[in-house]
Amino acid sequence: MPTATPRLVIDHLSRSFSGRAVVDDVSLSVAAGQVTCLLGPSGCGKSTTLRMIAGVERADSGRVMIDGADVEGPLVHLPPEARSVGLMFQDFALFPHLTVAANVAFGLKGDRASKARRVDELLERVTLQGFGSKHPHELSGGEQQRVALARALAPRPKVMLMDEPFSGLDNRLRDGIRDTTLEILKEEGAAVVLVTHEPDEAMRMADEIALMRAGRVVQRGAPYNVYNAPVDKAAAAFFSDINVIRGVSKGALTQTPFGAFLTPGHADGAWVDIVIRPQHLKIDFDRAGRGPSPTAQDGNAARGTVTRARFLGRESLVDFRMDFDGSTLTASVPGVFLPKPDTLLWLMIRRDRCFVYPSQSNQIFS
């Protein structure tokens, strides 16, 4: 488990290129044994942040500290090899002319015997015993990834930096490799910063997620909290498909197909977006045309007409055109459920799973 004292501290880090802020005032702290994921779309600044921590990119302002000592700042810029950081990239960056054992030993210091012991120890931990004499081209993608992990861990770095390290792997291998990697990283006790654009990967691996957008961290927290309390509509949409029910707030209430929603804090006449994920929009099979009736949690039922249904393997997605206003909502149903177009069904909504945000239009309806 992570300790209370941060091993890595990033303090107001910024970097611009050609006058454009790529990383804008980013601050983070990561404890030994903790995995923090920098999550966000391409171009949001997460890889540049990682490069500044590593020392391969100079910061315009801010500081990076490892175990309390400055490695990046206004008066210091230590090279990567002096920072006690391990680096893993999506292309693995193995030396093709070196054997597996030589790749793992590349960054090690000491006598030949101690190097050999460390190499053997790491190859065993990544389940590649007997592979030391092979060359990278003789290995599968998953095996190459494990060699890259062993090489990065060999010098016992205080901080491990990983930039999309699993993106080149086959989907069938990825989950197992990620779980193995996470187990080894936790055992080694390094502070880990993982860059990814995949929410599922961040949710699976992270102790903390730092969601980035346009160079800034817009939300930080445990995966459960970031997913279940997104800071805005864009954050909610980054983690999953969403439905948006738009309405006008009046007297702290907004009328929707499912009855009135409480929308306190929004001015009268202001447009609001009520966001709900497809899995929290429920088809009311029991009602089957008997019409709406209120319940304590879910409010009113609303009728919609099926416009499309498709099966995705573990679930079915069903699109509806709502009677109330003609808007389109999508429900996720476990298993196989493929009603024909024009089927009329009643829907319920999980109000405790809804998020209310100001509409981006910021219009006042009068």
Image: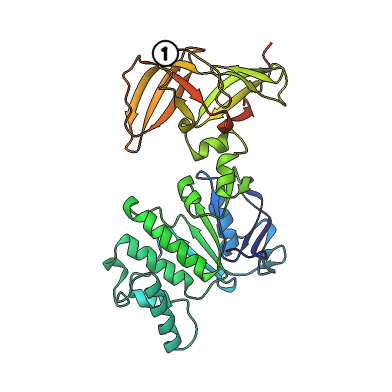
At 55% from the left edge and 69% from the top edge, which residue is drawn? Answer: 189
Is residue 147 depicted above or below 202 in this figure? below
| Residue 166 in view, yes or no | yes
* Crowdedness near tag 1: few (<14), some (14–19) or many (≥20) residues, C-alpha within 10 Å: few
Q: In this rendering, would 168 be left or right of 260?
A: left
The quadrant in which the C terminus is found is top right
Can the viewer see residue 18? no
Instruction: Give the residue at x 35% y 65%.
Output: 144
Instruction: Give the residue displayed 59% in from the left and 66% down from the top.
Output: 32
Name the residue that disc number 1 marks.
289
Q: Residue furthest left?
A: 138
Q: Quadrant of residue 179?
A: bottom left
How many marks do you count on the picture? Answer: 1
Q: Quadrant of the N terminus?
A: bottom right
Residue 272 point in image, percent of width and height? 63, 23
Q: Position of residue 147 (x, y in %)?
A: 38, 69
Name the element at disc 1: loop
Quick check: 333 above or below 187? above
- The front one of 192 and 98 is 192
Give the x, y percent position of residue 82.
59, 73
For this view, does 80 lie left or right of residue 77?
left
State the scheme by which the image is colored.
rainbow
Residue 40 picture location, percent across and down: 53, 45
Q: Residue at x 43, y 67 (%)?
A: 149
Residue 116 figure quarter = bottom left
